[in-house]
Amino acid sequence: MGKITAIKKLKRLYRVDLAELDQNKLYVCEDTIVHFFLSVDKIIEDDELLEIQRFDQFAQGKSLALYFLSFKMRTAYEVKKYLQEHEINSEQIEEILTVLSENHLVNDRAYAENFIRGKISMASAGPYQIKQKLGLKGIANELSDEVISEIYTEEDQIDVAYKLAEKLVRSSGHRLTLHQLQQKIIQHLMNKGFNYSVSSIALESLELSSDEEHEAELLYDELEKVAKRYNRNYEGYERKQKIIASLLRKGYDYSDVERALRDFTFEDDN
């Protein structure tokens, strides 16, 4: 048993001075002061002291969580991790998450719905990438699959994929042949989280066409670069095969490469 001898307001907490107890100071939040009607000269029993400490950690943890949530929506996993970093014990964390969930301050389904709608609105990602990102935030795969199927229709996916493909054409189309551009679009969309079917439909919707003269210039420019590299260590047939292999890896058509090589003059042929 002990007695409160002083209560002092600090920057964020209150310091409670105690007499006749092994622990002669307590640092508690305002909620704890109010909840237990703490005041100078109040007598604190040993079991009540333990209850005060337990409640205070819950109150401080809840306050931390509310502060964390004040900036933007968070998942239960994110809140839990934040509280762990602030040394709130696991039992209190679970209690805090329960209270937050009951008050709809933490709701993983609502978070997933908001996240997915944002990605659709910004036209920035396909369903597989969204699922992966939600997983990193602690959203269960089953919940992600369920919400994605409800919100992200195939029509929406094709629309977003088309916008991403269109953007890629504007930024890279002038530097690539039609075949290279088509390959790049499919790969880009699949990397963004769309399946092959949706990626292909988006590509077909672009109705791209080739410019033979421009593509011939691109191939010849690339041939000059590759030939200069292989001229140093190879010659004859071996050099030709190295060049062909390199250009094929870059997405050029074999027949076009052969045609360009027939008209190409190597430095040592001069």
Image (cartoon, helix red, strand yellow):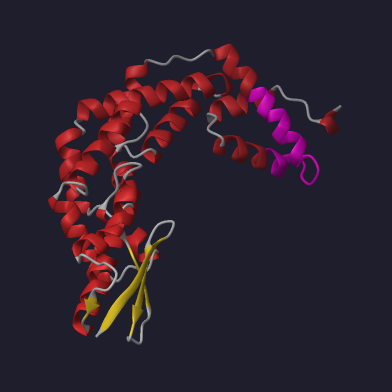
Question: What residue appears at the point 29 percent right and 67 percent down from the top-left corner?
Answer: 57
Image coordinates of residue 252 in percent, x first then y, are 55, 30
Q: Nearer the viewer, residue 115 or 246?
A: 115
Main SS of the magenta segment?
helix
Above or below, 110 against 265 in this view is below
Q: Nearer the viewer, residue 60 or 148?
A: 60
Q: Nearer the viewer, residue 46 or 195?
A: 46
The magenta stretch is 219-240
Question: What residue appears at the point 24 percent right and 26 percent down from the top-left corner?
Answer: 156
Question: What residue appears at the point 32 percent right and 52 percent down from the top-left corner?
Answer: 137
User: Residue 12 appears in which quarter of the rendering?
Assistant: bottom left
Magenta highlight on residue 236: yes
Magenta highlight on residue 161: no
Horizontal side, residue 219 vs residue 135: left or right: right
Image coordinates of residue 216 in percent, x first then y, are 61, 18
In the displayed image of the protein, which residue is found farthest to the front?
41
Question: What residue appears at the point 35 percent right and 28 percent down from the top-left corner?
Answer: 122
User: Residue 125 appears in which quarter of the rendering?
Assistant: top left
User: Residue 113 appears in which quarter of the rendering?
Assistant: top left
Q: How many marks?
A: 0
